[in-house]
Amino acid sequence: MKPFLILQLRPEDDAADGEYRAILQKGGLDSARAQRIRLERDGLPDGLNFDAFAGVVVGGGPGCVSDAPEDKAPDEARAEAAMLSLMPEITERDIPFMGCCYGIGILAHHLGAEVSKARFGEPVGPVACEVTQDGANDPLLKGLPRAFNALVGHKEAVQTLPAGAVHLMSSAPCPFQMIRYGKNVYATQFHPEADGDVFAERIRIYKDRGYFRPDAAETLKRAVYAADVSTPPDILYRFFRRYF
């Protein structure tokens, strides 16, 4: 059986390691079925062949697609450029893909939609999301609750639905919480791999990165621990099972 390719963009070792563990655990994926690449550190290997993989998952990160090039840290810029270089083949071949948070910005930017900080940013914490009618008929969402909480925290957002994309989920603060392009290319603004423990650790790691006031960290930790975010991991689990 082919492994899944897990691509990461987080420069912090503890954040990257925690994200990788969460993707495996919440997705029900054994490490033997995963190949992990940290793009910000290692870049893309020569001769990367998507035919060797069952699908691709891209994690989040502190960078923003819409940041000016001179404002991007070198490692973040390197990871983003590497990821964007893969998107033409992924979308043209309709390769199974799940982009989480940063991943929806990368997908939408590649498809020519505006990704910016103009509107729709969300503070760190839980948000109530709703499944659209198209979402209710999608294989990854069919049969799930039409409304559930998910964990978010992002400065930029997709401003308009990319041409050719299907709108699957929304929230009151951010209309584009999940989209699909083609039949197999998915992206979420929320974090399907995250629970209270995962987000509390990220709050610790990123408390000085401008997502929230540092003195609000403990309050935010209590909020994410208290939130019922049991449904989003089902989406990640279904993604892996669909493409096994």
Image (spheres, rainbow, N blue to C red):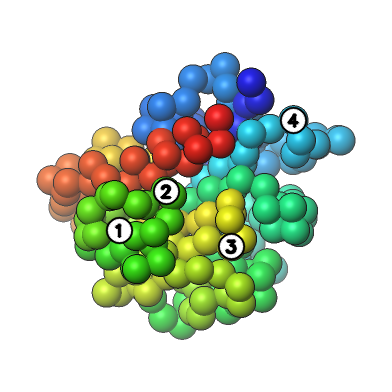
Other residues around mark 3 within 10 Å, as few (<14) / some (14–19) / many (≥20): many
Q: Which mark is residue 52?
A: 4
Q: Residue at x 45, y 69 (%)?
A: 167
The residues bearing labels 4 and 3 have C-alpha atoms spaced at a distance of: 22 Å
SS type, badge 3: strand
Q: For the residue labelled by badge 1, is the local secondary structure a helix, a strand or a loop?
A: strand
> Whole-Å distance between the Cαs marked 1 and 2?
25 Å
* Secondary structure beneath label 2: loop
- Element on which disc 4 rests: helix
The tag earlier along the polypeptide, 1 or 4, is 4
Q: Disc 3 residue type?
A: Tyr
Residue placed at 66% from the left, 75% from the top?
112
Seen as rendered, the residue at the extreme right is 47
According to the picture, the residue beneath numbered tag 2 turns out to be 140
Give above or below for 130 relative to 215.
below
Residue that label 3 marks:
181
Query: Relative to 99, is 19 on the left or the right?
Result: left
Depth check: give the residue in front, 212 or 44. Answer: 44
* Disc 1 crowd, CA 10 A, few/some/many (<14, 14-19, 20+): many
**Which amino acid type is marked by label 2?**
Leu
Q: CA distance from mark 3 to mark 2?
A: 13 Å
1 vs 2, front mark: 2
Q: Position of residue 21 (x, y in %)?
A: 44, 28
